[in-house]
Amino acid sequence: MISCYIRYVIDPYKVSEFEAYAAMWLDLLPRFGGTLHGYFLPSEGESDIALTIFSFPSLAAYEQYRKDASVDPDVQKALEFAKETRCFVRYERSFFRPLLPKGA
C-alpha cells in the first residue's frame, strides 16, 4: 500500500471554494480504486493550510489512477474549478508506506 499526503496552501478567503473542490474528490478518488482518508480544512491555527490523505494498493495502482484521471471529464471539471477559483496557491505531495496493526 502507498499513501499520499497533500498539503495545500489555500487562499484563506476562499475556504468555501476549496471545500467545494475537495468535495468533488470525495466521489472521484474512490472511482479510480483509491481509499480517501479525508480532506482536512482549517479550523484552529493556520488559516491557509488544508490537507488530504489517500491510499492505493500499490504504486502501480496509483500510477494507473494518474493515467486514467488525466482523461476523465469529471476530473478535468474539478481541476478547471480549482484553476478558475484559485482556491489554492500551491501544494506539496509526499508518499508514505503505512505501518498498520496486524489484520488492518
Image (cartoon, rainbow, N blue to C red):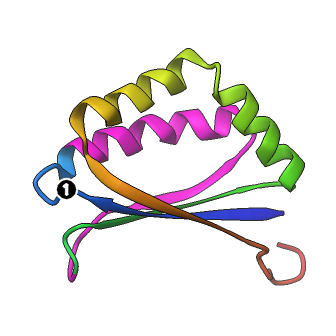
Which residue is drawn at the image coordinates 33% and 29% (left, top)? Answer: 81
Residue 79 image-quadrant placement: top left
Residue type marked 1: Asp
Which residue is drawn at the image coordinates 50% and 41% (left, top)? Answer: 26
User: Which residue lies under the disc numbered 1?
Assistant: 11
Which residue is drawn at the image coordinates 49% and 23% (left, top)? Answer: 76
Q: Is residue 32 above or below residue 34?
A: above
Quarter of the figure that contains the C terminus? bottom right
Q: Indicate the position of residue 80 as horizontal and vertical percent values.
A: 38, 26
As drawn, is 58 to the left or to the right of 39? right
Q: Is residue 91 above or below residue 86?
A: below
Q: Indicate the position of residue 67 as horizontal and vertical percent values.
A: 74, 31
Which residue of the protein is positioned furthest toward the top in this rendering? 73
As drawn, is 38 to the left or to the right of 57? left
Q: How many marks?
A: 1
Which residue of the protein is positioned furthest toward the left in this rendering? 13
In magenta stretch: residue 95: no
Q: Is residue 27 above or below residue 77?
A: below
In magenta stretch: residue 18: yes
What are the residue bounds of the magenta stretch? 17-45
Which residue is drawn at the image coordinates 22% and 41% (left, top)? Answer: 17
Residue 89 image-quadrant placement: bottom left
